[in-house]
Amino acid sequence: MKHKTDCMMQNIAGENLLVPLGARVLDLNGLMTLNETAAFIWALLDQERTLDELIAAVAERFEVPSAVARADIQTFLAEITRLGLLEE
Amino acid sequence: MTAPGGLPTEYGPLVGELGRRAIERRQPVNGTFELTERCNLNCTMCYVRQPAGHAALRAGELSPRAWLELTLQAMENGMVFLLLTGGEVFLRPDFFEIYTPLTRLGLLLTLFTNGTLITDAIARRLAEAPPSRTEITLYGATAATYEAVTGVPGSFGRCLAGIEALRKYRVPLGLKSTLTTRNVGELEAMRKMAAAWDLPFSAAWLLTKRRDQAPCGVAGCRMSAAQCVELEATDRASASEWRERALRGAPSENEKNFYCAAGKAAFVVNSRGEMSPCLDLIQPAARPLESGFREAWQEVQAFVDSAPPLAPLCRACEVRDYCPRCPAFSVLETGSLSEPVPYLCEIAHARKERYGPHSE
């Protein structure tokens, strides 16, 4: 999986935001703020990744058990899937 | 995972909080590009008001390539919000050469227009990559009033056609009005027009003199201070703000002259490529395309930081917290960054009279 290319991550005063591009503005008129974990996952999804790759990367980066990483990742993936931002 | 770091979740408060944090970090997050000073309308109260056919101005306007270069540099320094305004932006035949590349960069774009040049084809093209928001100014609810303000026969019908075209293609749209003595009687009718279209509507009535100091008829367009405050009371958000301010009681301790985001998180680049803190100020006219954006932004910040403090009269004023004065208004009215503006003093007194501790 990877994220679609019609959203871009931006930073305001240290806060990460997803900004819609092109016609996506019509579906996602607003801003989505990302915490550090979500921003890290979004950046990983610039390229094609498996769930296991994401879990390993998040667990290592944030020094959390795999189960915690998996839960965070699945929550975020569910959110960006709901918004139509994930290519599978 | 949304709304981390104690950030609000609603769009308006979220943007407000991000703006506050950007000010603290001096991140130039809010850019405004004035693509042209020229306009196809001829409104007496306008602070820019340059003719559509002004050849010298047109010749001096930045090219699409220059706007893109400026945008990329500004984004490297932290710009995320970008307003494109004029004059009338659709007077530029190369508007889409400027606009389209900007839609691919991850900016939150806003477009200000009078709507009168928006055809079906333009609306359709905008919808391919729409701005987050487009704002059209209504100058009246009838052709007679609208065109008495704009001075251009047929402009009311063209404005309505532009609004309809943008609605047809679902381009995010809001309406606003600049109120003068000529059109204030149609405020309610304009609000009803917007409601019938299911569009947000706001109105402004603090009219400034022309930025280029040329003679203007703004004095004849302005409402009295009492009228302004009466009007303000019809806007629930404004009235609540003043009531809350009155309840807080304690006067502001802020002695800073520039109290907004101008020159701290916001900047403007005019059609010739000169940078200033806000649309009403032409100073310091930094040149980002020559010096580089970072240096120009530093120059703009230095201009704001070195501004004189509030005038003694303002510092001691008992209605200071009700006053809409800012350095730009002072410059336009008095030539100084800090002098009181008598018209605004009257408004501040009228506000205190209405909302202050003795108003109940």
Image: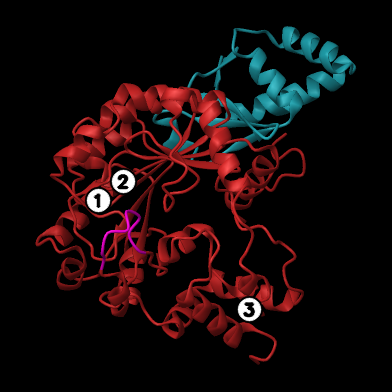
Chain colours: A cyan, B red
Amino acid type assigned to the residue bearing label 1 in the image: Gly
Residue A5 place in picture, x, y as percent: 49, 18
Residue sitting farthest toward the left = B153
Is residue B273 something one can see in this rendering?
yes
Q: Secondary structure at mark 3?
A: loop
Q: Nearer the viewer, mark 2 or mark 1?
A: 2
- Which of these two is toward me, B121 or B273? B273
- Which of these two is toward me, B149 or A72? B149
Residue B319's label in the rendered image is 3
Q: CA distance from mark 2 to mark 1?
A: 12 Å
Q: Residue at x 28, y 76 (%)?
A: B220
Look at the picture and state if B267 lies above or below B312: above
Residue at image mark 2: B86
Amino acid type assigned to the residue bearing label 2 in the image: Gly
Instruction: Tell whether position B14 is magenta.
Output: no
Same chain for labels 3 and 2? Say yes or no. Answer: yes
Image quadrant for the C terminus of chain B? bottom right
Q: Nearer the viewer, mark 3 or mark 1?
A: 3
Residue B311 place in picture, x, y as percent: 61, 67
Residue B269 place in picture, x, y as percent: 41, 38
Quarter of the figure with residue B204: bottom left
Residue at image mark 1: B115
